């Protein structure tokens, strides 16, 4: 059975969305700041970036499939990354923005055997790691 994990949305994503929205609103009200065609193109570009960012925030998933692969899906506008579970050398946890000994944001780093790294942020990190360990253990038992 496939197991799917959704991605955490960090506070910095919301801050970036708010900043982009405020810049877009500024250029809507102050079209005299730039020429009208340049202002319109800039507003359209900012709104397009916002749509891509929201799409990525909502639709990022990590699926551990029965064929012993991990599929990282980062929305409709990005290419899927398929990683065989046997290629994962180890998983590290990284704490970002430590304040008072507590991490405000954590992420996982999947280090592959060819020394490439994939940074992911599943909502339930412990379940994600346990699921990968169980899938790898099942396949080792089946091979013996």
Image: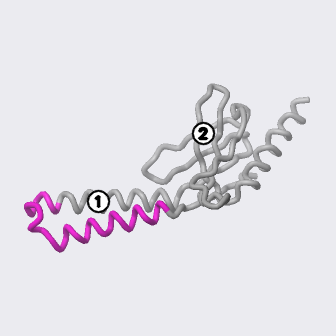
Residue 18 falls left or right of residue 112: left
| Residue pictured at 83% horizontal, 45% vertical | 134
Identify the element where label 2 is drawn: strand
- Please tell me the numbered disc located at residue 91: none
Confirm whether the magenta stretch covers residue 32. yes
Q: Which residue is mark 1?
A: 46
Q: Which residue is mark 2?
A: 82
Q: Earlier in the sequence, mark 1 or mark 2?
A: 1
Which quadrant is home to the C terminus? Answer: top right
Residue found 45% across the figure and 47% down from its top: 78
Along the line of sight, which residue is nearer the eye, 135 or 21?
Answer: 21
Q: Is residue 64 above or below residue 115?
A: below
Discs 1, 2 touching: Cβ within 8 Å: no
Q: Main secondary structure of the magenta part?
A: helix
Please tell me which residue is depicted at 63% across the width and 42% down the height of the picture. Answer: 109
Badge 2: few (under 14), some or many (20 or more) residues near its Cα, within 10 Å? some
Q: Residues in magenta? A: 12-40
**Residue 20 falls inside the magenta stretch:** yes
Q: Quadrant of residue 26?
A: bottom left
Q: Look at the image and name its color scheme.
A: one colour
Give the CA separation, mark 1 to mark 2.
31 Å
Name the residue at 42% across, 50% down: 77
Q: Name the side, left or right, on which 79 lies relative to 40.
A: right
Q: Nearer the viewer, mark 1 or mark 2?
A: 1
Q: Position of residue 102 (x, y in %)?
A: 66, 60
Image quadrant where residue 16 sits: bottom left
Element carrying mark 1? helix
Position of residue 6 measured from the top left corner of the image (x, y, whole percent): 62, 59
Residue at the extreme front of the image, as rendered: 100
- Furthest residue in direction bottom, as rendered: 29
């Amino acid at each position: 059975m496939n197991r799917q994990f959704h991605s955490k949305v960090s506070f910095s994503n919301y801050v970036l969305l708010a900043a982009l929205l405020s810049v877009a609103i500024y250029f809507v009200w102050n079209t005299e700041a730039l020429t009208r065609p340049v202002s319109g193109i800039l507003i359209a570009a900012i709104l397009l970036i916002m749509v891509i960012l929201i799409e990525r925030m909502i639709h990022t998933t990590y699926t551990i499939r029965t064929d012993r692969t991990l599929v990282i899906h980062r929305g409709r506008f990005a290419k899927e990354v398929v990683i065989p579970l046997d290629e994962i050398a180890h998983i590290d946890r990284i704490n970002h923005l430590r304040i008072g000994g507590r991490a405000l944001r954590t992420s996982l780093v999947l280090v592959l055997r060819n020394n490439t790294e994939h940074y992911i942020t599943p909502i339930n990190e412990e379940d994600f790691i346990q699921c990968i360990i169980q899938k790898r253990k099942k396949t080792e038992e089946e091979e013996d």
